[in-house]
Image (cartoon, rainbow, N blue to C red):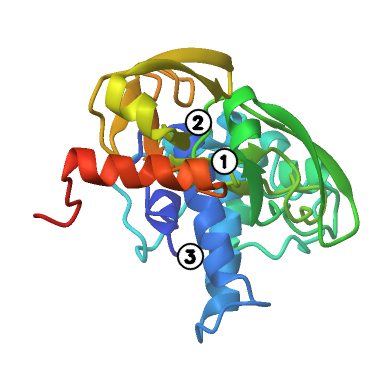
Amino acid sequence: MEYKDYYKTLGVERNASEADIKKAYRRLARKYHPDVSKETNAEQRFKEIGEAYEVLKDPQKRQSYDQLGANWKAGEQFRPPPGWESAGFGGFGGHGAGFDGASGFSDFFESIFGGGFAQSAGAGHSFQQAGQDQSARINVSINEAYHGANKTIRLSNGKSLQVKIPSGITSGKKIRLSGQGSPGINGGPNGDLYLEITVVDDAIYKLEGKDIYIDVNIAPWEAALGDKIPVVTLDGQVEIKIPANSKSGRKMRLAGKGLPGSPAGDLYVRLLIVAPPATTQEEKTFYDDMRNMFKFNPRAK
């Protein structure tokens, strides 16, 4: 029979961690799953990947497999080394013990792990397969991104889940919900659900990265003479000092008042000068006096 290089099948090094092996298996299982793959050899590759994972995910099976040596190459003719059976390997209890040949794995696997696999997995049962990961998008308000929140989401299957939105989260970040993806096969673990966050601007606050922007209207005399005005932030009201002769569109930076984090973002207050309407004759006369007094042309530049 041919020797099977399970590490090569999964595309990992022989010293790969359990996490690396699991990650490689999930990626390949999704790629070659017969129900979704368009590869011509998908079914065969899917079986090979499942067989390799069955061995390498189990520390005892992996240790026994590694004792065969790293010098074997896939495709070479293989026979278990002398004394393999008597040493207590070969199926963890003797090849053929309770095994009915229905595992769906290769002769190589059966010669090494046949009996023990049938006893542990149950004769006639196929190998376990982890469920596929799924992804979805979720919108959160700037207020929720700033303070954090608990949101209820409804999945496509009608199931409702409580999701904790951490304070300081930004658009593009993902929240992982373990075990909430597609169900596993034959008792395999469920996949995970990844929620991609989109922080939605509102009528008052805008978000760029971790910085928050807000427009604040001021009167002409506040801009010309300078003043202190209140500004409502997501963390409560603060007072800012407007410098004299400020122009419309000027930005005032409040360090650390943006989204929380390390470092926190900043809050930028954009000043917009709003002229009061002239509705009475007295107000119109006042504006006319200003025109004659200042000789100011806003379009001079």
Do the residues under discs 2 and 1 have CB atoms within 8 angstroms?
no
Q: Which mark is residue 50?
A: none
Residue 154 location (% of width, % of height): 84, 52
The numbered mark, 2 or 1, whose residue comes first in the sequence reads 2
Is residue 86 visible from the viewing direction of this image? no
Q: Residue at x 52, y 68 (%)?
A: 31
Q: Is residue 155 left or right of residue 8?
A: right
Is residue 169 visible from the viewing direction of this image? yes
Q: Residue at x 20, y 51 (%)?
A: 298
Residues 81 and 21: in front is 21
Regarding mark 2 in the picture, which secondary structure is present there? helix
Q: Residue at x 60, y 57 (%)?
A: 50
Do the residues under discs 3 and 2 have CB atoms within 8 angstroms?
no
Q: Is residue 300 left or right of residue 9?
A: left
Q: Which residue is mark 3?
A: 1
Regarding mark 1 in the picture, which secondary structure is present there? loop
Q: CA distance from mark 3 to mark 1?
A: 71 Å
Regarding mark 3 in the picture, which secondary structure is present there? loop
Query: For the residue marked with disc 2, what is the amino acid?
Result: Gln
**Closer to the camera: disc 2 or disc 1?**
1
**Mark 3 crowdedness (10 Å alpha carbons): few <14, some 14-19, many ≥20:** few
Residues 220 and 67: in front is 220
The numbered mark, 3 or 1, whose residue comes first in the sequence reads 3
Query: For the residue marked with disc 3, what is the amino acid?
Result: Met
Q: Which residue is mark 2?
A: 63
Q: How many marks?
A: 3
The quarter of the picture where residue 165 lies is top right
Q: CA distance from mark 3 to mark 2?
A: 21 Å
Residue 131 location (% of width, % of height): 71, 54
Q: CA distance from mark 2 to mark 1?
A: 61 Å
Query: For the residue marked with disc 1, what is the amino acid?
Result: Ile
Q: Which residue is mark 1?
A: 204
